[in-house]
Amino acid sequence: LWSPELFSLKQRIEETFGYQFNSVLLNLYRDHNDSVAWHRDKESRYGKRPVIASLSLGQTRNFDFRKKDHHQSKYSLSLPHGSLLIMKGNLQENWEHRIAKSVATMKERINLTFRLVREV
């Protein structure tokens, strides 16, 4: 079941971008020490080329990308409050991503990741 607020956000993203989602994952980053390591969202339940809509709320954090097989190729995006990042296509196949710890003191950040989860 979706709360009215989350359902409204989901519908707005779906209507704007034309994708369908049936799941949302909430990640809380309490401060600059909270992070998520390099990874790819390559689970079979997401399909071969998943579409993930990532909504950032609160503190701005950097979202880092690197090539799966060539770690020297790195990019970083600043994701401020209210930003929406759409990951799709071959991104999960060819790239890893993370939120690194920060040396600067930071406040809370909530990240909502909307996905289409399939039965396997």
Image (cartoon, rainbow, N blue to C red):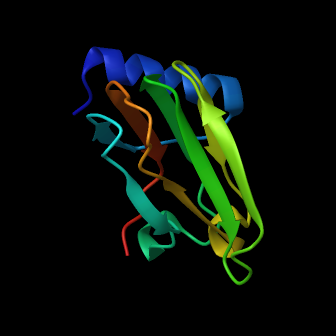
Q: Quadrant of residue 72?
A: bottom right
Q: Which residue is drawn at 57% across and 23% down?
A: 80
Residue 109, how many percent across, how many down? 37, 29
Q: In which quarter of the image is residue 78?
A: top right
Residue 89, how many percent across, how many down? 73, 60
Furthest toward the right, the residue is 73
Q: In this view, does 33 lie to the left or right of 48?
A: left
Q: Foreground: 103 or 107? A: 103
Q: Residue at x 50, y 31 (%)?
A: 55
- Placement of 46 over or under 52, stated as above or below: below
Q: Foreground: 94 or 60? A: 60
Q: Quadrant of residue 113?
A: top left
Count of numbered circles in the view: 0
- Placement of 95 over or under 23, stated as above or below: below
Residue 17, how many percent across, how many down? 69, 31
Q: Foreground: 12 or 63? A: 63
Furthest toward the front, the residue is 103
Q: Which residue is drawn at 70% across and 84% down?
A: 69
Placement of the C terminus among the 4 image quadrants: bottom left
Placement of the N terminus among the 4 image quadrants: top left
Q: Which residue is drawn at 38% across and 28% down?
A: 106
- Placement of 30 over or under 50, stated as above or below: above
Residue 49, how many percent across, how many down? 65, 65
Furthest toward the bottom, the residue is 69
- Placement of 111 over or under 35, stated as above or below: above
